[in-house]
Image (tube, helix red, strand yellow):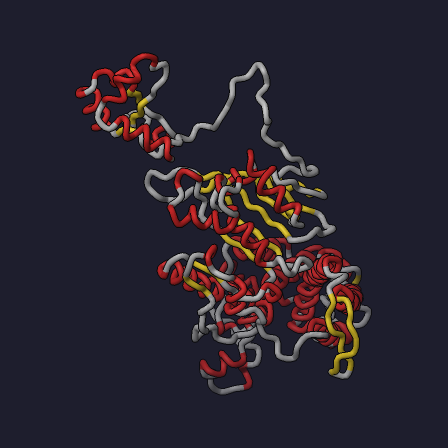
Amino acid sequence: MPIKKMWGGRFEKAASELVDEFGASISFDQEMAKEDIMGSLAHVKMLKATNILSATDADQIIKGLEELKTELADHGLHFTVANEDIHMNIEALLTEKIGPVAGKLHTGRSRNDQVATDFHLYIKERLPKVVAAIKELQQALVRLASENVETIMPGYTHMQHAQPISYGHYLMAYFQMFQRDVERFQFNQQHTDLSPLGAAALAGTTFPIDRQMTADLLGFKAPYANSLDAVSDRDLKIIVGSNSTLNLDADIKVKIKIQNFYGIEINDFAVSVARTAMWIAESQMWAESQNIIYSRDDFLPLDSNDSIFEGNALRMDWSEIVEPYDVNYIMGNPPFVGQSYRSNEQKQDMIDIFGKGSRETKQDYVICWYKKSLDYVSDYKNSSVKCAFVSTNSICQGECVPTFWKDMINAGVEIQFARRTFIWTNEAKNKAAVHCVIVGYSFHKINNIKELYDGGKLTKCDHINPYLVPEEDIWISSRPKRPKDKSKMTTGSPATDDGQLFLSPEEAKTMSKEYPILSKYIRPFIGAHEFLHDLNERTRYCLWFADVGDELPKIIKADHMKDRFQHIKVF
């Protein structure tokens, strides 16, 4: 229900929709909806306490405002241009709820002190958050500066090269600039702690209101000392606005573009998916940014997004895509492939990365990306580049730690944060849950606090070792000799027969029938797949030759058995 415009009596005809849309401020001052309701609640409670309004009328208004406050918090309120600003919109919604008694909310109050109060409340709540955000930025500058004390850059004066300076020193100059912003905003906080409510239009009201009561209810230190100053105070708006734009470009634009991101995908379909995902992400972030920089520039048309490349990332020179000194972060979710499941191409990748016969070639394929990242920045050891990969949790267990990780740590790598084992699943049929970790690392030591996540728990510590434990590095290596009371262990559970001793149900049935001597050696095989999905069905069998004894010559004579044994020997 539109409320009659305050200035409508000056015209014989209603304004056109174009004029209404041009003059309406609801598109931006709806940000003060909560503050408008808070101010009205404090005002009507004071009117009740001073007997200016009857308890019946006041309680009805309070109930309506509380309901609007709850609805705003739960799912928002619907505002219209017809009611032009937030104050008229809230009044219209209140009138719909409780009827004409809503109009009594104007008693002893003017639009002038109402607007001023809303703005003071809005700024009073947000200034501490602005100060906290600037201090967080300062902390980031200190961390980055401490990492780059010995990073040299050219210093300029009068737009000319002057002398070499530390990049850390350069960053700390901005720390000091932001410190002055903090001090200015802290002064503004004192300025916002005064309540304009009760000043009315400009010279107060004849009603016996209690300005101190409304100031207390709204959390202000005191009411303004002078009513004219309360409703005409533009200092606050100008100073806060000026402080917010100080040291910023006159033309505020989003500086991070989609072209700042580079990627490599294995095939054309994955490239298309990645490019589309980047456009979607850019669109979403642009919508978020618009509410920060108050820009209404159009996201469309789509800019070129040709920085996603197709190919095998392990066989490509990353420097040909982007030089390491132009990179801030490297991150990804490379494939996890155990030794028994690698393709010939993947086996060759591991040989190319680590060398033929190296211990790492028996570990998970995903470690190639860690080594590739280290090689990528090898000429820039003081680089501030940081890396993070999602990986199978096996890389932080067993022999991978005292071999692969020990070499990485000795090369200068330091783990900065990690997410301990978690289950990553998907919607695929017959899926198996993958146990993953996330490891974030730098290529040199950084004197800062490390963060270790485990479920919903965050542990802050000085060091994270490759076992993802908040302790100093420890290398649990294999024993050259077994303990005397233990059997020799040559491998874990994976079969290393290249499939020669596995049988399908049909093969097991045929072999048992044709070669009865093999029957007692044919056993059901239950691996991870069967355990997770086919426990009640026998989908695989194996030849289990234990305690063969004198029967071995007879077994070898069975068709293809000699060939199977020879293949295993070669493998």
Quick check: 144 above or below 348? Answer: below
**Which residue sits at x=54%, y=38%?**
421
Tell me: residue 293, above or below residue 526: below
**In which quadrant will I find the C terminus?**
top left
Count the numbered circles shown.
0
Q: Is residue 367 above or below residue 138?
A: above
Front in this rendered view, residue 358 or 247: 358
| Horizontal and vertical percent position of residue 231 | 72, 74
| Residue 308: percent from left, percent from top | 45, 64
Image quadrant assignment for residue 228 = bottom right
The answer to whether residue 104 is seen in the rendering is: no
The front one of 443 and 208 is 443
Can the viewer see residue 570 in this picture?
yes
Q: In this view, does 484 lie to the left or right of 472?
A: left
Q: Which residue is drawn at 52% across and 18% down?
A: 487
Where 143 falls versus 302 (above or below)?
Answer: above
Q: Residue furthest bottom?
A: 12
Residue sitting at the far right: 225
Name the quadrant containing residue 484. Answer: top right
Q: In this view, does 227 lie to the left or right of 556?
A: right
x, y percentage for residue 353?
Answer: 51, 50
Residue closer to the observer: 166 or 58:
166
In x, y percent, where is residue 551?
A: 29, 14
Residue positioned 40% across, 57% down in the render:
266
